[in-house]
Image: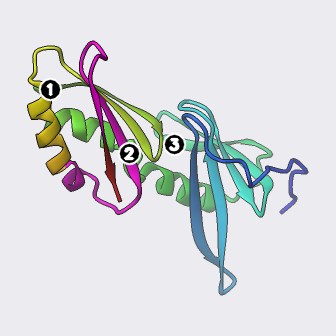
Amino acid sequence: MERVSKIYNGNTQPGSKMVSLDYLFEENGQLNAYQIVRFAPGEPWLVLDDGLLIATILKSEKSWTEIAPANMAAEKLEKIGRFIDKQHFNFLPEKIKTHWDDAVEEVIMQNDSEYLVICKSDIEFDRFKNVFSAFITELVEEEWAVEFKVYNANFTNEFIVRVF
């Protein structure tokens, strides 16, 4: 497989909206890893191997396609796409909104470890703080460090919950 000569600076820290995943796979009896990076929702994912860009992929409707350089095996592309689709950040905002339908107006993913939660205007915010803080760990199924910044409807009150 020919590598693209663009190099990603692996020291760059995830910024606002950036998601970085480690995709582990076995090839020829050895464990390998790709870093899968997306800089903002709706943008393509970059597939990096040891800092080298090997593919740029995007999900259109229900299937994953390679934008460039178009030399990744179809089976590997499908497996990487399924891996991305299974990530909890794809489901967590909707799970929170559904679980607290009467209290939560919107959940916005800043990146895979930080979410903004905006409450509805007609709730008792201090009571919701206690309920949310006590039960959010149940909705975060996998253990990873994630922070929720929760705001009332007019952004005059807030609290933070960290799950580890």
> Residue at the bottom extreme?
29
Q: Position of residue 55 (x, y in %)?
A: 73, 49
Sequence-first tag of 1 and 2: 1
Quadrant housing residue 141: bottom left
Read off the residue under disc 1. Answer: 125
- The residue tagged 2 is 147
Judge by depth and name the residue closer to the eye, 3 or 139: 139
Lower sequence index among marks 1 and 3: 3
Q: Amino acid at mark 1?
A: Phe
SS of the residue under disc 2: strand
State whether residue 110 is above or below residue 112. above
The local secondary structure at tag 3 comes to: strand
Instruction: For mark 1, give the secondary structure.
Output: helix
Residue numbers of the magenta segment: 136-160
For the residues marked 1 and 3, what is the alpha-carbon distance in whole angstroms? 41 Å
Residue 80 appears left or right of 158? right
